[in-house]
């Protein structure tokens, strides 16, 4: 039996998909990337914001068509949307045979097996706090992998549904994390990316352990040439963590600090912790240490005034982030922010988002231009036309731009190379292989 998977959403969801694929492989299922040939199709959904929900539902209906036009006998739906809207999905989409929530993936193979034998439709979204002990079938390139260090979130931001879906924060045991890293490194994974809904909370619920201590041990795993840390919560990140990252040559100097806003009143309404003045000082401290700075912002949060939005623009212009993602506020069902007064019209939110992204585009170009002439170590990721594609420690996969490398010498994806940056665009860079540069 061949299984095909559509995986949507964030890197945490991708890890779920990879664990599912491993469990299904162990159960004897084969894998295919051609949905028309799959006898079992799985849609691992995202339920974070409205556009993600819509994309997930579209994917479910698209895969359901293969029951008529392809080999599909069983359609399974998993992930965040399945966890949150199980009853509605089962009622409104009768083509779904199996629905499994975010902590029940160990039951998926058996559920599919029963469905293939003509059993009744099945639904299981009972939440537990266990981490799976299984392998991974990587859906990333073989030299790069995401490492889950925690699950759930305790922050309870007013706009966010993640705690409703994934539950409260729980740290993955240190031994499990390091063992998985050793296994993946032994398989040739060179870039290890530590992720969780809130990586900086790791260890708080364990008898012993801190993120700094985990980072120290992870950096010493043989074969880990790049160690990258994503999704740091602002008030949990301090100079000690920056210093720890700086002390290891294989830890990428890349600070991903989602701020969401820069005005104290708005941050308080969002139920976000931290002093924005201290956070700005930390950002400057990290930049002085050679870090790339990345953040995300929400515009059009309920009650955001034009003056407060201008303060956000001023903050962005002052800090000059190397990377920034932004999106317009989306009122999510059952979240506190959805019920707040002062909801901003969609046109106003779009206009503010466009203004913020236009400002960031100018900053990004200027920051990239400052890199022209520098020598950087890059990871080769592939080839486009006559040029190779690559990333430096300052570019995270799936989020940031690429470096396009001119080279006469044959370069292999997954290999490192020294390049000279020769040109800058808004989000991408050009370079030549250092040994071939004029």
Image (spheres, rainbow, N blue to C red):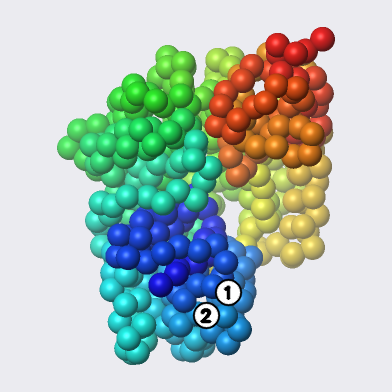
416 versus 146 height, above or below: above
x then y, percent, for residue 266:
59, 48
Residue drawn at (54%, 73%) of the image: 37
Q: Would you say 42 lies left or right of 101 here? A: right
Residue drawn at (55%, 45%) of the image: 267
Give the quadrant of residue 166: bottom left
x then y, percent, for residue 56:
57, 69
Q: Would you say 353 lies left or right of 193 here? A: right
Give the quadrant of residue 422: top right
Q: Would you say 220 lies left or right of 356 here? A: left
234 or 15: nearer the viewer: 15
Q: Residue furthest left?
A: 207
Residue drawn at (76%, 32%) of the image: 387
Which one is earlier in the sequence, the residue at label 2 or at label 1?
1
Name the quadrant of the N terminus.
bottom left
Residue behind mark 1: 36
Q: Would you say 334 lies left or right of 329 here? A: left
Q: Secondary structure at mark 2?
A: loop
Residue behind mark 2: 71
366 versus 107 height, above or below: above
x then y, percent, for residue 66:
57, 80
Crowding at mark 1 (Cα within 10 Å: few <14, some 14-19, many 20+): some
Q: Secondary structure at mark 1?
A: helix
292 versus 51 height, above or below: above
Crowding at mark 2 (Cα within 10 Å: few <14, some 14-19, many 20+): some
424 or 356: nearer the viewer: 424
Name the quadrant of the C terminus.
top right
């Amino acid at each position: 039996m061949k299984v095909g998977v559509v995986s949507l959403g964030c890197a945490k969801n991708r890890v779920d998909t990879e664990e599912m694929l491993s469990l299904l492989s162990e159960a004897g299922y084969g894998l295919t990337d051609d949905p028309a040939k799959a006898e079992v199709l799985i849609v691992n959904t995202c339920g974070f914001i409205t556009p993600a929900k819509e994309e997930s539902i579209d994917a479910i209906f698209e895969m359901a068509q293969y029951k008529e036009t392809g080999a599909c006998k069983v359609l399974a739906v998993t992930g965040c949307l399945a966890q949150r809207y199980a009853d509605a999905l089962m009622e409104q989409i009768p083509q779904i045979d199996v629905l499994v929530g975010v902590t029940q993936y160990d039951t998926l193979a058996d559920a599919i097996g029963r469905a293939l034998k003509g059993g009744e439709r099945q639904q299981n979204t009972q939440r537990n706090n266990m981490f799976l002990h299984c392998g991974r079938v990587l859906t990333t390139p073989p030299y790069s992998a995401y490492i889950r260090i925690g699950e759930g979130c305790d922050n309870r931001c007013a706009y966010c549904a993640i705690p409703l879906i994934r539950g409260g924060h729980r740290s993955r045991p240190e031994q499990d994390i390091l063992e998985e890293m050793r296994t993946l490194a032994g398989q040739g994974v060179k870039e290890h990316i530590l992720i969780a809904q809130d990586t900086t909370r790791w260890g708080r619920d364990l008898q012993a352990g801190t993120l700094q201590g985990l980072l120290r041990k992870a950096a010493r795993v043989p074969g880990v040439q790049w160690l990258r840390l994503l999704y740091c919560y602002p008030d949990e990140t301090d100079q000690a963590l920056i210093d720890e990252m700086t002390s290891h040559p294989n830890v990428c100097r890349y600070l991903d600090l989602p701020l969401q806003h820069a005005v104290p009143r708005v941050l308080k309404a969002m139920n976000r912790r931290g002093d924005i003045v201290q956070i700005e000082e930390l950002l400057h401290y990290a930049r002085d240490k050679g870090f790339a700075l990345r953040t995300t912002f929400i515009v059009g949060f309920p009650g955001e005034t034009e003056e407060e939005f201008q303060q956000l623009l001023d903050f962005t212009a002052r800090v000059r982030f190397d990377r920034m993602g932004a999106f317009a506020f989306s009122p999510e069902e059952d979240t506190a922010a959805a019920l707040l007064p002062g909801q901003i019209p969609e046109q106003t939110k779009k206009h503010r988002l466009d203004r913020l992204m236009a400002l960031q585009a100018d900053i990004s170009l200027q920051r990239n231009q400052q890199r022209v002439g520098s020598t950087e170590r890059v990871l080769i990721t592939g080839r486009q036309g006559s040029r190779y594609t690559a990333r430096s420690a300052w570019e995270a996969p799936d989020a940031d731009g690429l470096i396009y490398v001119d080279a006469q010498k044959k370069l292999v994806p997954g290999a490192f190379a020294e390049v000279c940056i020769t040109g800058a665009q808004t989000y991408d860079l050009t370079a030549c292989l250092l040994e071939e540069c004029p």
